[in-house]
Image (tube, helix red, strand yellow):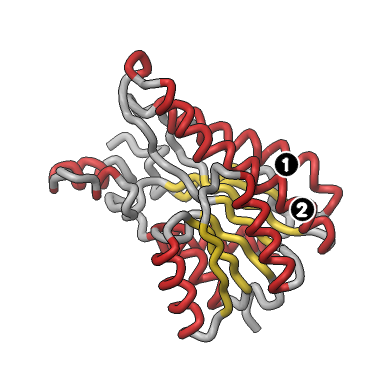
Amino acid sequence: MNILDGKVAIVTGASSGIGRATAKLFAREGAKVIVVARRQAELAALVAEIAAAGGQAIAVAGDVRDEATAKDAVGAAIDRFGGLDIGFNNAGTTGEMAPVAEVSLAGWHEALETNLTSAFLGARHQVPAMIARGGGSLIFTSTFVGYTAGLPGMAAYAASKAGVIGLAKVLAAELGKSGIRANAILPGGTDTPMSITNAPGATAEVLAFVEGLHALKRLARPEEVAQSVLHLASDASSFITGTAMLVDGGVSICRT
């Protein structure tokens, strides 16, 4: 028996990185998955890959900043698979990187809307569907930035992702009596397209510097972070709620 047999899950930001790896892992563990992102072609390829491996998934293309996307994803879960048990609200952006005095208002709003408002919208529509099922697991992607460390030039990113932790804690307090758990994962450096180590012009020296910030002296693979999400989605974490779970390779404690 697979860990998530009989479960239905939404994964946002599923077209690449942690979201894509988690969607594939959920499907391998028996969940029926609704994958959400803006890029239709990448979602279609992911759904085909999951199907080829014997899993079930459907795609909902849309911008997570748009409430209609959150509503459509939950509607698809109910219409196609009968309900919703897991919401992994993962979509995000690093946003505009600059000293606070130089961050544009548009850049600030973009980071908050993509990272924080989208998480609120996802939860807003996922919660009633989970209550109808008798419980569920809400999981959010935050970061160590703004939680255990402040990195220059990342004010909008840090503030929006710190807000995600606050949202998860309030949801945990509100919804525990309904059998719904809410937690956030806080990844460290991860080898995804959004990583600064994969940005245009990033050098081997940049990669070595970022790796060196971590106690493990390397970046995470998306599949490693996905395992932490699986834990929080599964009954193995049945008494865990309201947590900010560091999955950061020791970047929060490393001083060497």
Res 148 seen here: no
Q: Amino acid at mark 2?
A: Ile
Quadrant assignment, res 101: top left
- Quarter containing the N terminus: bottom right
Res 12 seen here: yes
Residue 192, position in %: x, y? Answer: 34, 54
N-terminal of the pair, mark 1 or mark 2, is 1
Q: Amino acid at mark 1?
A: Leu
Residue 139, position in %: x, y? Answer: 61, 52
Gap in Å between the C-alphas at discs 1 and 2?
9 Å
Mark 1 vs 2: CB contact within 8 A: yes
Q: Residues within 10 Å of mark 2 (few under 14, many from 20)?
A: many
Instruction: Identify the mark at residue 180; answer none if there is no mark.
Output: 2
Quadrant assignment, res 83: bottom right
Q: Nearer the viewer, residue 71 or 35?
A: 71
Q: Nearer the viewer, residue 142 or 102?
A: 102
Residue 59, position in %: x, y? Answer: 54, 67
Identity of the residue drawn at 26% across and 47% down: 211
Q: Residues within 10 Å of mark 1 (few under 14, many from 20)?
A: many
Which residue is the extreme one toward the top?
A: 101
Identity of the residue drawn at 52% across and 54% down: 62
Identity of the residue drawn at 51% across and 66% down: 23
Quadrant assignment, res 231: bottom right
Residue indicated by mark 1: 171
Q: Is residue 50 above or below residue 256?
A: below
Residue 204, position in %: x, y? Answer: 13, 48
